[in-house]
Image (cartoon, helix red, strand yellow):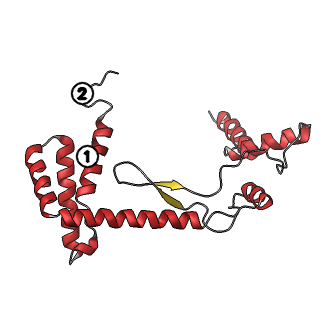
Amino acid sequence: MVVVSGGGGNAWAKEMTIRRRIASIFNKTQEHFPTLKDYNDYLEEVEDMTFNLIEGIDVEAIEAKIARYQKENAEQIFLSRAKRAEDLAAALKASRMNPVKTDADDTAAGSLQGISGGAGVQGQYAPAAVPGGLAQPRPTGMAPQPIGGRSDPLQGDDEETRRLRAERAARAGGWTIELSKRRAMEEAFSAIFL
Protein backbone atom coordinates (compact mmCIF):
# COMPACT_ATOMS: atom_id res chain seq x y z
CA MET A 1 0.00 0.00 0.00
CA VAL A 2 1.32 3.41 -0.97
CA VAL A 3 0.53 6.31 1.32
CA VAL A 4 0.77 9.78 -0.19
CA SER A 5 1.76 12.46 2.28
CA GLY A 6 0.67 16.05 2.16
CA GLY A 7 -3.05 16.46 1.49
CA GLY A 8 -3.67 12.93 0.32
CA GLY A 9 -6.55 10.62 1.18
CA ASN A 10 -5.49 10.38 4.84
CA ALA A 11 -6.49 13.94 5.74
CA TRP A 12 -9.96 12.88 6.87
CA ALA A 13 -8.63 9.93 8.89
CA LYS A 14 -6.02 12.16 10.52
CA GLU A 15 -8.64 14.75 11.44
CA MET A 16 -11.01 12.15 12.90
CA THR A 17 -8.22 10.57 14.96
CA ILE A 18 -7.25 13.95 16.40
CA ARG A 19 -10.87 14.92 17.09
CA ARG A 20 -11.55 11.61 18.88
CA ARG A 21 -8.45 11.99 21.00
CA ILE A 22 -9.21 15.59 21.97
CA ALA A 23 -12.88 14.77 22.67
CA SER A 24 -11.89 11.94 25.00
CA ILE A 25 -9.62 14.29 27.00
CA PHE A 26 -11.56 17.57 26.92
CA ASN A 27 -14.90 16.01 27.82
CA LYS A 28 -16.49 18.58 30.10
CA THR A 29 -20.19 19.31 29.69
CA GLN A 30 -22.18 22.48 30.28
CA GLU A 31 -22.93 21.26 33.80
CA HIS A 32 -19.26 21.80 34.71
CA PHE A 33 -19.47 25.57 34.07
CA PRO A 34 -21.29 28.33 35.97
CA THR A 35 -22.41 30.18 32.83
CA LEU A 36 -23.08 29.38 29.20
CA LYS A 37 -20.45 31.91 28.15
CA ASP A 38 -17.76 30.03 30.12
CA TYR A 39 -18.81 26.76 28.48
CA ASN A 40 -18.76 28.32 25.01
CA ASP A 41 -15.29 29.76 25.69
CA TYR A 42 -14.13 26.28 26.72
CA LEU A 43 -15.56 24.75 23.52
CA GLU A 44 -13.93 27.47 21.40
CA GLU A 45 -10.56 26.86 23.03
CA VAL A 46 -10.86 23.11 22.45
CA GLU A 47 -11.80 23.67 18.80
CA ASP A 48 -8.88 26.06 18.31
CA MET A 49 -6.48 23.46 19.70
CA THR A 50 -8.04 20.76 17.52
CA PHE A 51 -7.77 22.89 14.40
CA ASN A 52 -4.15 23.80 15.12
CA LEU A 53 -3.24 20.14 15.67
CA ILE A 54 -4.93 19.14 12.41
CA GLU A 55 -3.16 21.89 10.49
CA GLY A 56 0.17 21.32 12.26
CA ILE A 57 0.31 24.78 13.83
CA ASP A 58 2.33 25.04 17.06
CA VAL A 59 1.94 21.32 17.78
CA GLU A 60 4.55 21.12 20.57
CA ALA A 61 2.88 23.85 22.66
CA ILE A 62 -0.55 22.30 22.19
CA GLU A 63 0.69 18.82 23.13
CA ALA A 64 2.26 20.29 26.29
CA LYS A 65 -1.04 22.03 27.11
CA ILE A 66 -2.93 18.74 26.60
CA ALA A 67 -0.50 16.84 28.86
CA ARG A 68 -0.80 19.53 31.55
CA TYR A 69 -4.62 19.44 31.31
CA GLN A 70 -4.62 15.64 31.56
CA LYS A 71 -2.53 15.76 34.75
CA GLU A 72 -4.61 18.49 36.35
CA ASN A 73 -7.99 16.98 35.42
CA ALA A 74 -7.27 13.24 35.45
CA GLU A 75 -10.04 12.49 37.95
CA GLN A 76 -12.64 14.57 36.07
CA ILE A 77 -11.67 12.91 32.77
CA PHE A 78 -11.98 9.47 34.32
CA LEU A 79 -15.35 10.29 35.90
CA SER A 80 -16.71 11.72 32.64
CA ARG A 81 -15.64 8.61 30.73
CA ALA A 82 -17.23 6.38 33.37
CA LYS A 83 -20.48 8.38 33.26
CA ARG A 84 -20.54 8.16 29.46
CA ALA A 85 -19.99 4.39 29.63
CA GLU A 86 -22.83 4.05 32.16
CA ASP A 87 -25.15 6.13 29.97
CA LEU A 88 -24.32 4.02 26.92
CA ALA A 89 -24.83 0.79 28.86
CA ALA A 90 -28.19 2.03 30.14
CA ALA A 91 -29.28 3.03 26.64
CA LEU A 92 -28.19 -0.34 25.25
CA LYS A 93 -30.05 -2.16 28.02
CA ALA A 94 -33.17 -0.07 27.38
CA SER A 95 -33.02 -0.80 23.67
CA ARG A 96 -32.75 -4.52 24.35
CA MET A 97 -35.62 -4.42 26.86
CA ASN A 98 -37.99 -2.85 24.30
CA PRO A 99 -37.75 -4.96 21.15
CA VAL A 100 -39.75 -3.82 18.17
CA LYS A 101 -43.05 -5.70 17.86
CA THR A 102 -43.84 -6.44 14.24
CA ASP A 103 -46.81 -8.23 12.84
CA ALA A 104 -46.44 -9.62 9.32
CA ASP A 105 -49.70 -8.07 8.09
CA ASP A 106 -49.08 -4.67 9.75
CA THR A 107 -45.53 -4.57 8.40
CA ALA A 108 -46.59 -5.32 4.85
CA ALA A 109 -49.42 -2.78 4.94
CA GLY A 110 -47.22 -0.12 6.53
CA SER A 111 -44.40 -0.54 4.03
CA LEU A 112 -46.83 -0.09 1.15
CA GLN A 113 -48.33 3.06 2.59
CA GLY A 114 -45.02 4.57 3.70
CA ILE A 115 -45.82 4.38 7.40
CA SER A 116 -44.12 2.48 10.14
CA GLY A 117 -45.37 -0.99 10.90
CA GLY A 118 -45.13 -1.84 14.55
CA ALA A 119 -45.63 0.17 17.66
CA GLY A 120 -42.91 1.79 19.58
CA VAL A 121 -39.28 2.41 18.94
CA GLN A 122 -38.79 1.89 15.23
CA GLY A 123 -36.39 4.43 13.79
CA GLN A 124 -34.71 5.24 17.09
CA TYR A 125 -30.97 4.93 17.51
CA ALA A 126 -29.16 2.73 19.98
CA PRO A 127 -25.49 3.12 20.86
CA ALA A 128 -22.93 0.94 19.17
CA ALA A 129 -19.68 0.07 20.91
CA VAL A 130 -16.71 1.48 19.04
CA PRO A 131 -13.05 1.08 19.98
CA GLY A 132 -11.68 4.28 21.43
CA GLY A 133 -14.59 4.99 23.73
CA LEU A 134 -16.77 6.92 21.28
CA ALA A 135 -20.13 5.61 20.19
CA GLN A 136 -21.85 5.90 16.87
CA PRO A 137 -25.60 5.71 16.40
CA ARG A 138 -26.95 2.46 15.06
CA PRO A 139 -30.50 2.25 13.71
CA THR A 140 -32.79 -0.21 15.40
CA GLY A 141 -36.16 -1.50 14.40
CA MET A 142 -37.57 -3.28 11.43
CA ALA A 143 -35.20 -4.61 8.78
CA PRO A 144 -35.62 -3.36 5.20
CA GLN A 145 -38.50 -5.02 3.40
CA PRO A 146 -38.07 -6.35 -0.12
CA ILE A 147 -40.15 -4.75 -2.83
CA GLY A 148 -42.73 -6.94 -4.48
CA GLY A 149 -43.67 -9.15 -1.55
CA ARG A 150 -46.80 -11.20 -1.47
CA SER A 151 -48.88 -8.15 -0.58
CA ASP A 152 -47.66 -6.18 -3.63
CA PRO A 153 -50.74 -5.21 -5.67
CA LEU A 154 -48.65 -4.95 -8.83
CA GLN A 155 -47.71 -8.60 -9.08
CA GLY A 156 -48.28 -10.41 -12.29
CA ASP A 157 -47.22 -9.96 -15.86
CA ASP A 158 -50.38 -8.93 -17.66
CA GLU A 159 -50.73 -5.78 -19.76
CA GLU A 160 -52.62 -3.74 -17.14
CA THR A 161 -50.05 -4.46 -14.43
CA ARG A 162 -47.16 -3.44 -16.71
CA ARG A 163 -48.97 -0.22 -17.60
CA LEU A 164 -49.59 0.58 -13.91
CA ARG A 165 -45.95 -0.12 -13.04
CA ALA A 166 -44.72 2.16 -15.83
CA GLU A 167 -47.16 4.91 -14.80
CA ARG A 168 -46.16 4.73 -11.13
CA ALA A 169 -42.46 4.65 -11.98
CA ALA A 170 -42.86 7.75 -14.16
CA ARG A 171 -44.78 9.59 -11.42
CA ALA A 172 -42.16 8.62 -8.86
CA GLY A 173 -39.58 10.31 -11.06
CA GLY A 174 -41.68 13.48 -11.28
CA TRP A 175 -42.97 12.91 -14.83
CA THR A 176 -46.64 13.05 -15.77
CA ILE A 177 -48.42 12.81 -19.12
CA GLU A 178 -49.73 16.35 -18.61
CA LEU A 179 -46.18 17.61 -18.31
CA SER A 180 -45.23 16.19 -21.70
CA LYS A 181 -48.40 17.57 -23.32
CA ARG A 182 -47.76 21.05 -21.90
CA ARG A 183 -44.15 21.00 -23.06
CA ALA A 184 -45.16 19.92 -26.57
CA MET A 185 -47.72 22.76 -26.74
CA GLU A 186 -45.18 25.34 -25.51
CA GLU A 187 -42.60 24.20 -28.06
CA ALA A 188 -45.17 24.22 -30.86
CA PHE A 189 -46.41 27.74 -30.10
CA SER A 190 -42.92 29.12 -29.52
CA ALA A 191 -41.87 27.89 -32.98
CA ILE A 192 -44.79 29.73 -34.64
CA PHE A 193 -43.65 33.19 -33.49
CA LEU A 194 -40.03 32.96 -34.70
Quadrant of the drawing holding the C terminus: top right
- What is the spatial separation of the Cα atoms under label 2 and label 1, in whole angstroms? 17 Å
The reply, left or right, for residue 110 in relation to residue 52 is right
Residue at left 20%, top 66%?
A: 75
Q: Is residue 37 above or below residue 154?
A: below
Q: Give residue 82's quadrant in the image.
A: bottom left
Residue at left 30%, top 50%?
A: 20
The reply, left or right, for residue 41 in relation to residue 81 is left
Which three-letter amino acid code belongs to the residue tagged 1?
A: Ile
Residue at left 80%, top 42%?
A: 165
Q: Which mark is residue 150?
A: none
Q: Give residue 159's quadrant in the image.
A: top right
Looking at the image, the residue that sits furthest to the bottom is: 34
**Residue 178 visible to an observer of this rendering:** yes
> Percent x, y for residue 115?
69, 61
Q: Secondary structure at mark 2?
A: loop
Q: Is residue 4 above or below residue 178?
A: above
Q: Secondary structure at mark 1?
A: helix
> Percent x, y for residue 146?
72, 45
Q: Which residue is mark 2?
A: 5
Q: Which residue is mark 1?
A: 18
Quadrant of the drawing holding the N terminus: top left
